[in-house]
Image: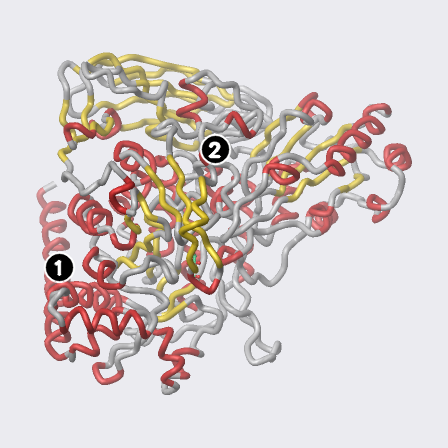
Amino acid sequence: MKKLSLVAILILFGSFLLAQSGNQIIKHVIAKMTLQEKVRLLIGGNDVKFEGAYTDVTNKVPGAAGFTYPLRRLNLPSLILSDGPAGVRIEPIRNHDSSKTYYATGFPVATLLASTWDTALVYKVGDAFGNEVKEFGVDVILAPAMNIQRNPLDGRNFEYYSEDPVIAGNIAAALVNGIQSNGVGTSIKHFVANNVETDRTTLNEIISERALREIYLKGFEIAVKKAQPWTVMNSYNKINGIYTSENYDLNTTILRKEWGFKGLVMTDWGGGRHPVAQAKAGSDLLMPGTQNQFDEIMAALRNGSLSIDVIDNNVAKILGLILKSPSYKHYKYSEEPDLKAHAKISRLAASEGMILLKNEGNALPLQNNIRKVALLGDASYNTIANGTGSGEVHKPYVVSIFEGMKNSGYMIDNQSTTASVDALASKDDAAIITIGRNAGEGSDRPVDGDFTLKDSEREVIKKVSTAFHAKGKKVIVILNIGGAIEVASWRDNVDAILLAWQPGMEAGNAIADILSGKVNPSGKLAITFPMKYSDEPSAGNFPGTTFPKQARAAIFGSNSTNREVDYKEGIFVGYRYFNTFKVQPAYPFGFGLSYTHFNFSDLKLSDSSFHHHLTASVTVKNSGDVAGKEVVQLYISAPKGEEGLEKPEEELKAFAKTNLLKPGESQTIQFSITPNELASFVESHNAWIADKGVYTLRIGASSVDIRQQASFAVPSEIIVEKTHAIHYPKNIQDLQ
Ligand code: BGC
């Protein structure tokens, strides 16, 4: 014990010394920099292109999203920043020469990774991803994206994890830790509440401080505290009238002072309006960088409205990042990561995050006598690996469902697309229909024909089901989508539904692994599927209201109007709303079927009274016939307390995935509960408070399938954390 603590002290002292020497170097470099050099470093290197002298930098990694300014005089290299959440987004072909290519692995999208509920697996994905970042010569990957999926129509939902911050924060932390274990940086984005794409650069959002802290900031807080990402990227939108990138309280008071973030904050590309306000707020690096920003900051320094201390502080953050970077260390990158090994990880992760939504009469896995399958729907042949925009990866291939099924030994005759449905029903043993959806940054999805099915899709489902069922044959629907769609009106027609999400470049192989039974599905929903769009708590406030009179140009020349979204639902986002107000969803948060069954037993709490800490343990047993994994979800239902603060029926506080349990095998899972898990944010006290009273701890296989529960008391109110009184204008009109 004594020895261990000595080692720990030595390690701590060692890292303290390293940090000190880093700080000394930074101070020394700042002392040598001219004012111009400092300001040049604060804005991205985009305008370097026009200076013409740095083609080695601008051409270093073609297709990268941006780079920082190189300061040759001081031996400070340019850092390369690249998108995006599902893999390294760079140009695969350089100078029209395809004899050497630069394709990167297309990993499953974020929503799928969250649906694995498996932080160890996501770490593995991060590790492989980070290796590609490093081997392609990139210093910081602009990922993970981790905004809350407030509404199913958001065009970027596929890039985001969940409607719940505990899932989003923990999955993001696992990915960040995996990527950064390679010695490259991440950028968790978009800080914060980037929940609407329509008019995203002029959008104002009205959010209560409680909803902001409990729902929209919480995931970022978890990721910062558990993983210390090297950088954070702020969002395009305003919150209560202030651009997030210009908000000191967000970027400095909350992120740095309250959470202890040590890294650099950068803007989203062209985000915000006022570079001086951004610099003062703690947005250290303005991306991608313009001459105007340079001029405005220089002018403010000259006229005394901006202090050099602010600039030195921001420059120090950029220097800190440079010192850690592979570019500074002259890392010799290979441009040849092991795509084959990473494809295996991509396939594994994909199959672990797919969700079996329906399985009537054990339609899946396909029985051994099913060999010939009718395969319908364009996405069966043009399978969607990931969404569009900066979240799209240039991957070497995408295995379609057609190819994946053939690779698994199924016979798919190409007549599926042309033959009559009756002919297919006579010839084939089962039918698979794939419904595909794609979306991306810059716009949101429409309800008609996107959230709901198109008429042609309804017709196919109907006709195929009638014909195949008449012959006693099964019909399976695969959802190759990036966000929730309407299922309630058509699901009764089909036997099974597999929610495959957008599963990356090994899509078809991973889907075939589930359909054939090679992999037992263990994914669970990290979002709610509503019965109909209007059931969504934010349906009336998405994508908000426009004010066309105040129209002005947005970035990149696009026209954008001023738009406002009122987050009227407050903290009641997703299952917090559905479960509290007893609105029946189509599929609830946390739901997902398996080819086996699990029993939960022996829930034990370490105490019936909470003081500083509590542990809960529960045993999960595979009571079915095949091996499988279960996601164990821990929810807490808190008392209202003396001030009568509204609280959700229950909130997810922890989760774990079991090992692969053989039939009859059990595993005991242990959870740790701290005061943080009991607290709500009380605006009038600027504090996180755990109310006195009786709490119920629920262990479930979904948010509504609670298998075990136990109560414990908090004998007196606990002030868990006092926060800063942040500048948070309540009256939005004052700011416009
Ligand atoms: C997106 C970011 C992305 C950046 C750089 C922006 O339009 O919102 O997520 O990282 O572009 O490509």
Please provide percent x and percent y for residue 638. Answer: 28, 18
- Within 10 Å of the Cα at label 1, are there few (<14), some (14-19), or many (20+) other Cα atoms? few
Amino acid type, callout 2: Ile
Residue 666 falls left or right of residue 11:
right
Seen at 27% across and 32% down, the residue is: 210
Question: How far from the left and from the top, in percent, is residue 452?
Answer: 64, 34
Q: Nearer the viewer, residue 654 or 145?
A: 145
Decide: few, some or many residues near mark 2? Use Cα within 10 Å; few <14, some 14-19, many ≥20: many
Which residue is rendered at x = 11% and y = 65% of the image? 309
**Mark 2 to mark 1 CA distance (whole Å):** 43 Å
Q: How many marks?
A: 2
Q: Position of residue 616 (x, y in %)?
A: 29, 22
The residue at 32%/36% (across/down) is 207
* Residue 623 falls left or right of residue 669: right
Q: Amino acid at mark 1?
A: Gly
Residue found 47% across the figure and 18% down from its top? 705
- Which mark identifies residue 401? none
Residue corresponding to mark 1:
14
Pick the residue in front: 54 or 325: 54
Residue 453: quarter of image: top right
Sequence-wise, the earlier of marks 2 and 1 is 1
Tell me if residue 539 can be seen: yes
Would you say the beta carbon of the disc 2 residue lies within 8 angstroms of ligand 1?
A: no
User: In what element is the residue under mark 2?
Assistant: loop
Quadrant position of residue 587: top right
Name the quadrant where ligand 1 sits: bottom left
The quadrant in which the N terminus is found is: top left
Question: Is residue 144 visible in the rendered structure shown here?
Answer: no
In this rendering, position of residue 154 left or right of residue 25:
right
Quick check: 285 above or below 249? below
The kind of secondary structure element at disc 1 is: helix
* Residue under numbered circle 2: 527
